[in-house]
Image (cartoon, rainbow, N blue to C red):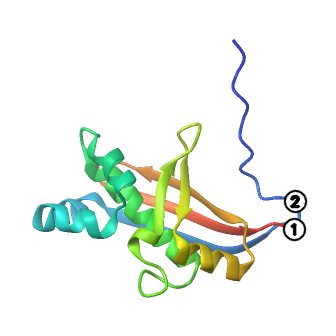
Amino acid sequence: MSAPPTPDFRLPVGGTVCGLGIDFIECDRIARILNRQGERFLARVFTDIEREYCMAMSNPVPHLAARFAAKEAVSKCFTTGIGAELGWKSIEVRKGGRGEPVIHLDEKGGSLLRALGAGGVLVSLAHTAAFGQAVALIYRPA
């Protein structure tokens, strides 16, 4: 049995990094907010796709934390933060064909990406029982 093809996550030759962001959050913080606000928190911050994925896990908190961190990291790439220009649900973490995290942007996010002349957003997630982390990068092809 041959190995599946390796996806190419490298920047295009001559491409430019337009933004870089990182975020790190304690899972206990997400758990406290979830216990206090429940569905209101989930509905305000996470898309249906994200909620379905995370809530299917035996412990959804680390998965929610990693996605929360991804939203923060992407907003830092754009230098907007979360607010009027880019909402919590403007940034969605989906699963790619190999299970890798892939960023999907709504119209607000897409407009910001086009304004930069950028080609997309790359993201890497990590989590433990205690912490969620994400690193995001916006790139412009050559």
For disc 2, the neighbor class at 10 Å (few under 14, some 14 to 19, many from 20) is few
Q: Amino acid at mark 2?
A: Val
Q: Are marks 1 and 2 in contact (CB under 8 Å)?
A: yes
Give the left or right position of residue 53, taking residue 112 as reference.
Answer: left
Asked which quadrant contains residue 31, the reply is bottom left
Q: Where residue 125 appears, x then y in whole percent?
A: 49, 53
The C terminus, quarter of image: bottom right
Give the left or right position of residue 119, taking residue 63 as reference.
Answer: right
User: In the image, is residue 114 above or below residue 80?
Assistant: above
Q: Which mark is residue 72?
A: none
The Cα–Cα distance between marks 1 and 2, rounded to whole angstroms, is 7 Å
Q: Which mark is residue 13?
A: 2
Q: Where residue 9 appears, x then y in whole percent?
A: 71, 50
65 or 84: nearer the eye? 84
User: In the image, is residue 122 above or below residue 1?
Assistant: below
43 or 64: nearer the eye? 43
Give the left or right position of residue 22, taking residue 120 as reference.
Answer: left
Residue position marked by numbered label 1 in the rendering: 142
Look at 47% across and 80% down and name the residue there: 86
Look at 57% across and 58% down and name the residue there: 123
Asked which quadrant contains residue 57, the reply is top left
Look at 42% across and 80% down and name the residue there: 82
Labels 1, 2: front one = 1
Q: Where residue 141 appears, x then y in whole percent?
A: 81, 66
Look at 27% across and 58% down and name the residue there: 27
Q: Amino acid at mark 1?
A: Ala
Under tag 1, what secondary structure? Answer: loop
Instruction: Tell which residue pokes out farthest to the bottom in this image.
Output: 84
